[in-house]
Image (tube, rainbow, N blue to C red):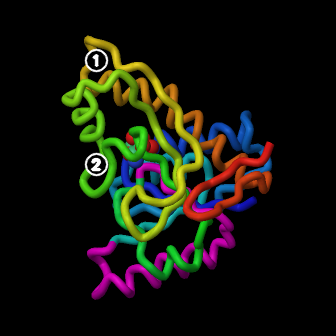
Amino acid sequence: MKIAVFVSGGGTNLQAIIDNTKTGILKDIEIVLVLSSSPSAYALKRAEENGIKSVVVRAADYPSREEWDNEMAECVKASGAELIVLAGYLSLIGPKTVSMYSNRIINIHPALIPSFCGAGMYGIKPHKAAIARGVKVSGATVHFVNENYDEGPILLQKAVEVLPDDTPETLQKRIMQECEWQILPKAIRLIADGKVTIDNNRAFIRE
Ligand code: GRF
């Protein structure tokens, strides 16, 4: 299966996918495109180092949101990707791209949805909110993407304990290492194997 990975920042989740295509559970998966919302994303360097084609599609460079959305949809179509993986991608996907890739876009969110999600809950913020609320577990969620932030069907979740002396930073790091880098490649595997169905806004995994 061919996939496109959308990024905005450091790209550690992209790296986890790349590593799995080389030595892990994604050896038959080809990353045909890395699309970044920012020209300075370190994720672009990871793509270059691994010989993966990349492109920057930045909303600010287009006269309207519609044209930006069109360009994005065209880039993915031209790449031949069958699945779009949002891996630390910070923009809301436009309606054309969402409808063209209906049930074929997934996102990783660094909290257990429906907690600490929605507009503005990115980066360190979900972890700050989790600690401020005093939750005893947090984690990460892979979900399908629709036109609203963090609302599509949930595919996978993994939890870790929140420890009494955790800071937002220590919690973020543990969730990335123990949750995000594990469940995002796993979600791609399940979809590539045709094991995922969606019914009534719920995702089901066939064993
Ligand atoms: C991750 O925590 C991801 O869950 C969130 O943004 C962060 C991006 O990290 N959506 P990276 O760019 O993959 O290193």
Q: In the image, what residue occupies the spot 55% across and 46% down?
A: 49
Residue 203 percent across, percent down from the top left: 62, 54
Magenta portion: prevailing SS class:
helix
User: In this picture, which residue range is highlighted in magenta?
Assistant: 59-88
Q: Can residue 55 be seen in this view?
A: yes
Of callouts 2 and 1, which one flags the residue occurring earlier in the amino acid sequence?
2
Instruction: Please indicate whether residue 179 sits to the left or right of residue 21 in the image.
Output: left
Residue 124 percent across, percent down from the top left: 27, 38
Disc 2: CA contacts within 10 A as few (<14), some (14-19) or many (>=20): some
SS at circle 1: loop
As for residue 77 lying within the magenta part, the answer is: yes
Instruction: Please indicate whether residue 141 sits to the left or right of residue 171 in the image.
Output: right
Residue 76 percent across, percent down from the top left: 58, 73
Q: Which residue lies furthest to the top in this view?
A: 165
Q: Which mark is residue 105?
A: none
- Residue with the mark numbered 1: 166
SS at circle 2: loop
**Ligand 1 falls in quadrant:** top left
- Residue with the mark numbered 2: 121
